[in-house]
Amino acid sequence: EPEVTQTPSHQVTQMGQEVILRCVPISNHLYFYWYRQILGQKVEFLVSFYNNEISEKSEIFDDQFSVERPDGSNFTLKIRSTKLEDSAMYFCASRRGLSGDNQPQHFGDGTRLSIL
Amino acid sequence: QKEVEQDPGPLSVPEGAIVSLNCTYSNSAFQYFMWYRQYSRKGPELLMYTYSSGNKEDGRFTAQVDKSSKYISLFIRDSQPSDSATYLCAMSGRGASGTSYGKLTFGQGTILTVHP
């Protein structure tokens, strides 16, 4: 069964450094998402991406964050200058979205980001 | 009032028991309701997906949605030790413009342990 893959599984970065998290969504999917989960807390929406542009973003997704689909397969989340509070699991998700909205999202296994 | 509320548990049951997991929500715009299962250090795995009110059954799992009460449930019959995981409810709905980009709002998650 096709799945969403994320790399790396664990990223350790110094505070203030830039980090790029990578995702390969399911190949025929059109909508892409990033979520994060701080340890012990809810999974929180960050951003949705469709037709090569951001369709919706949360308050968390400030100017330090950006997303990109650099080619036909990858979807990336960049954090420009990391802060301690960016430490979390980051999940990528995708959904097909062809026939209306009636398509669920499928998640990757996440990247654990640790900021030192 | 939180948009989605879910009792975090933990819930511990003997093998073979019927498990009932619940979420309440406040946003009447939610139309799509999902249950995900999350194992430790893994991403959310889609279990059930329902649209609007009613029941849906898949093997040992039954999802119920009661939009009038803003209440959703997941029942697990004949629970197994392999069902031990965190169960997340999630929901999405159309925005004011009538479109939906699929942003999911999650509950806190219920930690379930099924002991042999």
Image (tube, coloured by chain):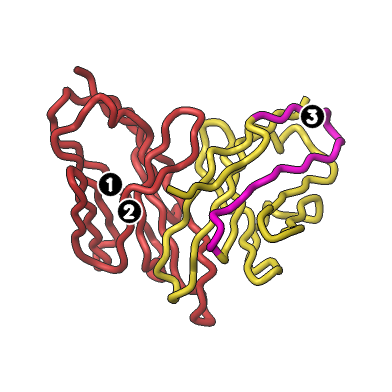
Chain colours: A yellow, B red
Closer to the camera in the image, A35 or A100: A100
Question: Marks 3 and 1, Cα distance to the nearest angstrom?
Answer: 38 Å
Rendered view: A78 above or below B53? above
Instruction: Give me the disc on residue A13.
Output: 3
Rendered view: B89 above or below B55? above
Rendered view: B44 above or below A59? above
Q: Residues within 10 Å of mark 3 (few under 14, many from 20)?
A: some
Q: At numbered mark 3, what does the secondary structure look like: helix, strand or loop?
A: strand
Is residue A25 part of the magenta span, yes or no?
Answer: yes
Report whether mark 1 lies on the same chain as mark 2. Answer: yes
Is residue A16 part of the magenta span, yes or no?
Answer: yes
CB-based contact (under 8 Å), mark 1 and mark 2: yes
Q: At numbered mark 2, what does the secondary structure look like: helix, strand or loop?
A: strand
Report whether mark 3 lies on the same chain as mark 1. Answer: no
Position of residue A61 in the picture relative to residue B8 (left or right) = right
Position of residue A16 in the picture relative to residue A21 (left or right) = right
2 vs 3, front mark: 3
Q: Residues within 10 Å of mark 1 (few under 14, many from 20)?
A: many
Q: At numbered mark 1, what does the secondary structure look like: helix, strand or loop?
A: strand
Chain hosting mark 3: A
Q: Which residue is mark 2?
A: B24
At label 3, the amino acid type is: Thr
Chain hosting mark 1: B
Q: Which residue is mark 1?
A: B22
CB-based contact (under 8 Å), mark 3 and mark 1: no
Q: Quadrant of the C terminus of chain B?
A: top left
Question: What span is in magenta?
Answer: A10-29
Q: Residue at x 83, y 31 (%)?
A: A15
Closer to the camera in the image, B19 or B57: B57
At label 1, the amino acid type is: Asn
Question: Marks 2 and 3, Cα distance to the nearest angstrom?
Answer: 38 Å
At label 2, the amino acid type is: Thr
